[in-house]
Image (cartoon, rainbow, N blue to C red):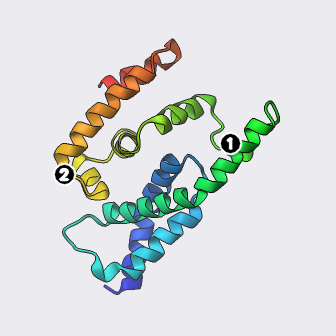
Amino acid sequence: MKKEEQINQWFTLYHNDIYNFLIYYLGTKDVEDMVQEAFVKGFKYIDQFEQRADPKTWLISIARNIAIDHMRKKKRQYALVDQLRSIFPGKSKLPQDWVLEDERKKDLYKIINELKTSYRDVVILRGILDFTPEETSRILKWKIDKVNLTYYRSIQSLRKKLTSEKWSDYIETINQ
């Protein structure tokens, strides 16, 4: 199969998975450019793709690296936003505050985002996107044992953070 046909097939099969991963990872619905970038890089490096791995996990690894680069670039911008908030307390919300419309999802995202990076990565991949430990290990380039241990610890950390009654249904979900 030609490279173009292969990447088009993968796009059809995995576009939504990569889109959803990036939404959860970055906390914004404005990720379409990064999804396209992941497939462009996938096309560029398709000759390096080892058939041992699942193409979806390989593409999500690419998307994760793109997201990490994006966050590094935005770090200065976020510092500026924080400075503006401290200078103008009580003013109307900044655009970043409107990312997730549902208040409960916004609160949950905030709590997940407060986790250390390795915990957040595993919670998004295993707990939200429902990837297997094997798929998660390939995406993060970790051993399966590390994925399982980190997931366990991240769930313990979430349980500590989700103590109020309004989170009781989430706590039941993560206890399963």
x and y percent of residue 175 in the render? 31, 23
In the displayed structure, 87 sits above or below 21; it is above
Residue 56 seen in render: yes
Residue underneath mark 1: 82
Contact, mark 2 vs mark 1 (Cβ under 8 Å):
no
Horizontal side of 50 relative to 123 (left or right) equals left
Q: Earlier in the sequence, mark 2 or mark 1?
A: 1
The residue located at (65%, 44%) in the rendering is 99
The residue located at (50%, 57%) in the rendering is 19
Q: 117 and 134: which one is in front? A: 117
Quarter-wise, where is residue 44 in the image?
A: bottom left
The amino acid beneath tag 1 is Asp
Residue 93 seen in render: no
Quarter-wise, where is residue 42 in the image?
A: bottom left
As drawn, which residue projects farthest toward the bottom?
A: 2
Q: 133 and 89: which one is in front? A: 89
The amino acid beneath tag 2 is Lys
Residue underneath mark 2: 143
In the displayed structure, 94 sits above or below 106; it is below
x and y percent of residue 119 in the render? 36, 40
In front: label 2 or label 1: 1
Task: State the quadrant of the N terminus.
Answer: bottom left
